[in-house]
Image (cartoon, helix red, strand yellow):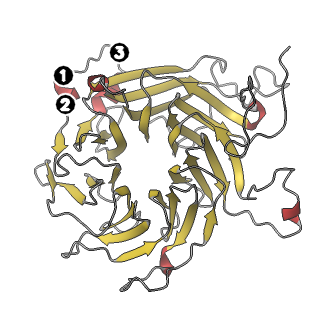
Amino acid sequence: MMEVDQSTFIPGRHKLSAGESLAPDHSAYGLLHQIGSTWPCLSIDVIKDNLGDNRKSYPATVYAVAGTQAERGKEKENQLMVMKLSSLSRMEKEGEESSSDEDSDDEDENTDPILETKAIPLTSTTNRIRAHQIPDTGSSTTFATTLTASMLENGQVLIHDITPHLTSFDTPGTTITPQQNKPISTIRTHKQNEGYALDWSPLWPDGKLVTGDCRGNIFVTSRNSGGGWVTDTTPFTGHSGSIEELQWSPNEKHVFASGSSDGTVKIWDTRSKSRKSAVSIKVSNTDVNVLSWSHLTPYLLASGHDDGTWSVHDLRQWKPTTTSSTPQPSPVASFSFHKEQITALEWHPTDDSIVLVAAGDNTLTLWDLAVEIDDEESKDTGGVRDVPPQLLFVHYMEQVKEGHWHRQIPGVVVATGGSGFGVFKTISV
């Protein structure tokens, strides 16, 4: 009989002994699925569908898009993966009967998950992929027009219209033509400079894209009156290192933030003729890998760093700086729980006290910033030392790279890593 150690294990703090392996505590999950893929993906994004908002029935269905990382020498096997994950059953609760009045409308909840894909051939690894949906104007199609922007290892940024790929999942007999697999635009202004930073503005319905590369150049691409795509060839410059992350403001359509390997976060206004940042703040002594701008409280910006720390900043405290000796504002919250680089960071879509964080220690953690603890309470943390009281949940996932909240299924997280794709929901969120 296999021996089970029920003690708390914290990746990055504790080490497995020979012959030991980790197993999740199923009682802590409402939903938990791991789905493999031929090649791992560095980046993933969740697609909004028309199955309804705030849905809680099971099995669940998720649409997503990801870009592969084929091994060296097999770059021609790379692809943009348009995905439908279905039959995502909920976790069975101990002692629960197989059916109840509350869940009588649910289908069989014990089915195996199903991954359906539509592949768009690529010849390079996708470093970052993001989706943007143009508001539906009354079309009868399953999905609003859905665009993806893929930043490739070869320096190109490809824009695809994946609407027919998504629609084909639910329309039997539909075939995708070679023409529909081709990008509707290819951005070459980065030349052969690799990059990882890319974001669609939520405030430009037809699409506005900002992209940054390892040479420190940032370009903005917009839709013209004829429906084509035009990139302003004059870059925004000022970082002394590579551009690691870009995030558009959720409430100011001309403003975006950048994070760089130089340890700074800069705020930019696209109307600036000088192409220089309006604000520049040193937030880390290591690379700023990721940023997340709260959509509920737009003056809150979170940053994740290469040393495993992450912070929350109040942008109302940030002022234009003129010299390097100008005092830098302190973050309103800062955490050093992770011991490896932060690779993903995202505010909860409907609760700006909840934050998702992924790190190089094979964990994806959930945090509740609303938690406060006094000195007496801090003496007792359930027998686990050095665990901040704001830490809500630790999910183990091998080589996790990126995670996102599903905006239509409350509490569900969709993630990608070296072991494939993960979909989970905790009972605490």
Kind of residue indicated by mark 2 = Lys
Identify the mark nearer the N-term, 2 or 3. Answer: 3
Kind of residue indicated by mark 1 = Pro
For image coordinates 89% across by 68% down, the residue present is 376
Q: Position of residue 237 (x, y in %)?
A: 25, 67
Tag 2–tag 1 contact (CB < 8 Å):
yes
Residue 181 visible in rendering: yes
Q: Is residue 168 left or right of residue 19?
A: left
Q: Residues within 10 Å of mark 3 (few under 14, many from 20)?
A: few
Q: Check disc 3 and report its element: helix, strand or loop.
A: loop
For image coordinates 34% across by 53% down, the residue present is 199
Q: Residues within 10 Å of mark 1 (few under 14, many from 20)?
A: few
Q: Position of residue 261 (x, y in %)?
A: 40, 60
Kind of residue indicated by mark 3 = Pro
Q: Nearer the viewer, residue 423 or 217?
A: 217
Q: Position of residue 31 (x, y in %)?
A: 65, 32
* Label 2 – label 1 distance at C-alpha: 7 Å
Tag 1–tag 3 contact (CB < 8 Å):
no
Q: Which residue is mark 1?
A: 178
Q: Which mark is residue 182?
A: 2
For image coordinates 46% across by 72% down, the residue present is 282
Identify the mark nearer the N-term, 1 or 3. Answer: 3
Q: Which mark is residue 172?
A: 3
Q: Position of residue 61 (x, y in %)?
A: 52, 29
Q: Check disc 1 and report its element: helix, strand or loop.
A: helix
Which quadrant holds residue 173? Answer: top left
Q: For marks 1 and 3, give the one nearer the viewer.
A: 1
